[in-house]
Image (tube, rainbow, N blue to C red):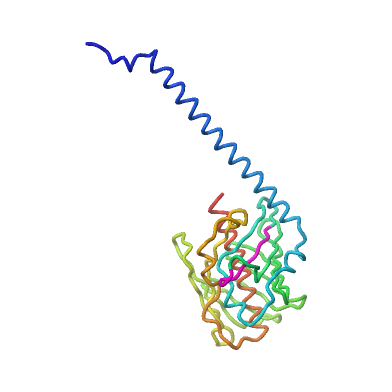
Amino acid sequence: MPTNPLLSPLIMFPIIFILTVGFVAMFALVAVHQIRMAYRHGQSNKAYLEGDFDQISSGLIAWRAEALRDLSSLVIWGGYTMVRFHHRGEVKSVEDPGGRAWLAFDYRGQGGRGTFVLRTSLRELRLSLERTFDGTRAQVSVDGETLGEIRESRPFVQMSDRNGYAVGEYHRRKRLLVSRVPLYGEVLMRGRRLARINSYLVSLDRWWALNKPSSYFRNPAIIDLDPWLSEEEESWLLALVGMEVDHSIWRAIVRHS
């Protein structure tokens, strides 16, 4: 029976060789591109982290009454996570996602502990965070004055004043499936609902965020805000947003590790 001349080893070998070389070359080009991107990404993050945080936070939008309503659910950040970690980023505006940010943060630590600094144009909050198997707890201060403590005690996040007395709770929402759909939990303080906070803020690496507009900018971090907040109540809401920023970054790290 005559054989197909196209299946002759003399013909098939060059074809296989050319295809193999082409595949290897394509793989090498992709690998080189990824290495270059990773290097540029690393250099960008390094410059960002070594920059002056005071200078970064000096460019924030001037804080005003509607600021909490306009906080985006998208956290843009950069940093590294090893034994020690350093995360830095911002939370922008729902109405003007391409403009300046409302919040800037800088978070440094080791293991499950760290200091989370959150700034608006008017004030600075410091959360001394500790992550345990039971959840997160944080000692909170505002402009150097102790505000109190946030402690996750499932199913609620409890807020206590500087003397240890309970002042409120945050009904943080949980979901079993991975999703980026907003899920809002109530914040109650002294028997009054202050707002609902998105328990699933979305963290996006700043390197990709620069050229990748996201619909998550359009989801507010806080909804159903009480129009008559005191300065103390506003500080508690900001502290809870800071805690959710921390959760969102660690979710992103676990998802991509």
Query: Looking at the picture, how far across and down is residue 197, in whole percent?
Result: 54, 74
Identify which residue is drawn at 72% across, 70% down: 126
| Nearer the observer, 117 or 5 | 5
225 relative to 32, above or below: below
Query: Looking at the picture, how far across and down is residue 199, in whole percent?
Result: 53, 69
Instruction: Please give left or right for residue 185 compared with residue 242 in the image.
Output: left
Corner quadrant of residue 139: bottom right
Instruction: Please give left or right for residue 229 compared with residue 154 in the image.
Output: right
Identify which residue is drawn at 48% across, 30% down: 23
Residue 168 drawn in magenta: no
Range covered by the magenta-colored residues: 87-96
Q: Main secondary structure of the magenta part?
A: strand
Identify which residue is drawn at 76% across, 55% down: 50
Corner quadrant of residue 146: bottom right
Query: Looking at the picture, how far across and down is residue 251, in whole percent?
Result: 55, 58
How many tags in the picture? 0
- In the displayed image of the protein, which residue is found farthest to the top? 1
81 relative to 139, above or below: above
Q: Which part of the image, by quadrant, shows the N terminus?
A: top left
| Nearer the observer, 91 or 252 | 91
2 relative to 205, above or below: above
